[in-house]
């Protein structure tokens, strides 16, 4: 196989209570990527459509992730070219950099005959995230590669648990058309939290994981509460409180900031409720005259996939 075309999915990270450790994979929002073998050694980004991003390998998240992976393998007598077709806007809060990082390492791994498992690939994709945000976090790249929900139990050593999603669980995500860089959103966070807040957060993380395993939708909803990060970041997002309240009024199990924002997510049981939430969220931003994009999606069980 000389060439492969991929769907690189968007993701929702943090999921309120799980800052830097929880994420899920979306089904119908994402980028496309072509990875092909090349006679020229190394990695080259030959085309980017849909975004103004650097073609230089060392300045592009997909290139950095790919180089991190190749550095662990015996030297090859060929290289790789990558074409990226961006549908996820940078700074949208639904894993734009993670989609590119995950797609690059997945595609090269496939063309090399899968020397690594999907879970092994996470460590390389994280290097793309480090370039994008200054922090090698896995809460987007893990679900992008593994599908479903993922929990990063530990970063040192890296230990990731994949969790199946209840079948009727849907995500609604609204992206107000402002860019909020992950590095900026991280700058407002405190380095220390109170023990009281930490205890509440631990309880919610445990509750959310338990709710997923037992398919207890109400428990999932009760656990989607962020005691630590959301109060600091929500002020950066126009209409956040109104959008969140609107989601609850229209049947959401829970709602919060998607990743570092500005996107806002809501989880719900069933597509009909998810569509109703999308309609209600849209009306809020239309009244504010703020351009937006909105996605309604099942949870993607597969992650990056070959087209």
Image: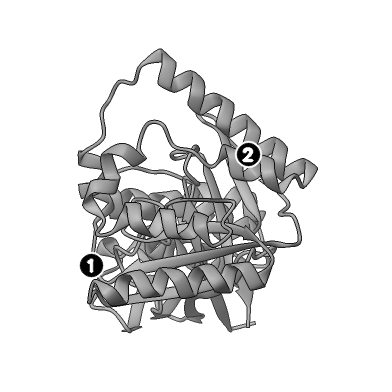
**Residue 295 at x, y = what percent?**
49, 73
Q: Dot 1, crowdedness within 10 Å: few (<14), some or many (≥20)?
A: some
How far apart are the alpha carbons under marks 1 and 2? 30 Å
Quarter of image, res 203: top right
Q: Of label 1 and label 2, which has the lower sequence position?
A: 1
Residue name at image x 41 percent, y 31 percent: 227
**Residue 50 visible, this orientation:** yes
- Vertical comparison of 17 with 163: above or below: above
Asked whether disc 1 touches disc 2, contact meaning CB atoms under 8 Å apart, the reply is no
User: Which is nearer the eye, 205 or 36?
Assistant: 205
**Residue 112 at x, y = what percent?**
62, 68
Residue name at image x 39 percent, y 70 percent: 43
**Residue 132 at x, y = what percent?**
29, 55
Q: Residue furthest right?
A: 214
Q: Quadrant of the N terminus?
A: bottom right
Q: List the residue tagged with mark 1.
A: 178
Mark identifier at residue 208: 2
Q: Secondary structure at mark 2?
A: helix
Residue name at image x 57 percent, y 33 percent: 205
């Amino acid at each position: 196989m000389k060439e492969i075309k991929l769907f690189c999915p968007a993701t929702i990270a943090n999921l309120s209570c799980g800052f830097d450790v929880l994420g899920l994979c979306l089904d119908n929002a994402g980028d496309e990527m072509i990875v092909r073998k090349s006679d020229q050694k190394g990695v080259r980004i030959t085309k980017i459509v849909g975004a103004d991003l650097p073609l230089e390998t060392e300045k592009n998240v997909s290139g950095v992730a790919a180089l991190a992976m190749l550095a662990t393998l015996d030297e090859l007598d060929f290289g790789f070219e990558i074409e990226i077709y961006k549908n996820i806007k940078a700074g949208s809060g639904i894993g734009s950099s993670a989609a590119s990082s995950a797609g690059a390492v997945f595609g090269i791994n496939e063309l090399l005959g899968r020397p690594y498992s999907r879970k092994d690939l996470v460590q390389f994709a994280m290097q793309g995230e480090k370039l994008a945000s200054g922090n090698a976090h896995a809460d987007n790249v893990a679900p992008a590669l593994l599908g479903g929900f993922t929990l990063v139990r530990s970063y040192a050593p890296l230990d990731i648990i994949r969790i199946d999603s209840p079948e009727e669980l849907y995500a609604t995500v609204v992206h107000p058309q402002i860019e909020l860089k992950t590095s900026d959103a991280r700058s407002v966070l405190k380095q220390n939290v109170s023990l009281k807040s930490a205890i509440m957060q631990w309880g919610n993380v445990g509750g959310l994981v338990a709710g997923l395993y037992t398919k207890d939708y109400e428990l999932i909803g009760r656990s989607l509460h962020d005691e630590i990060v959301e109060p600091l970041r929500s002020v950066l997002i126009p209409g956040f409180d109104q959008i969140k309240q609107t989601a609850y009024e229209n049947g959401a199990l829970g709602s919060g900031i998607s990743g570092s924002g500005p996107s806002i997510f809501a989880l719900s049981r069933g597509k009909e409720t998810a569509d109703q939430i999308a309609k209600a969220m849209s009306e809020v931003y239309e009244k504010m005259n703020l351009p937006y994009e909105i996605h309604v999606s099942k949870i993607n069980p597969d992650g990056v996939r070959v087209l």
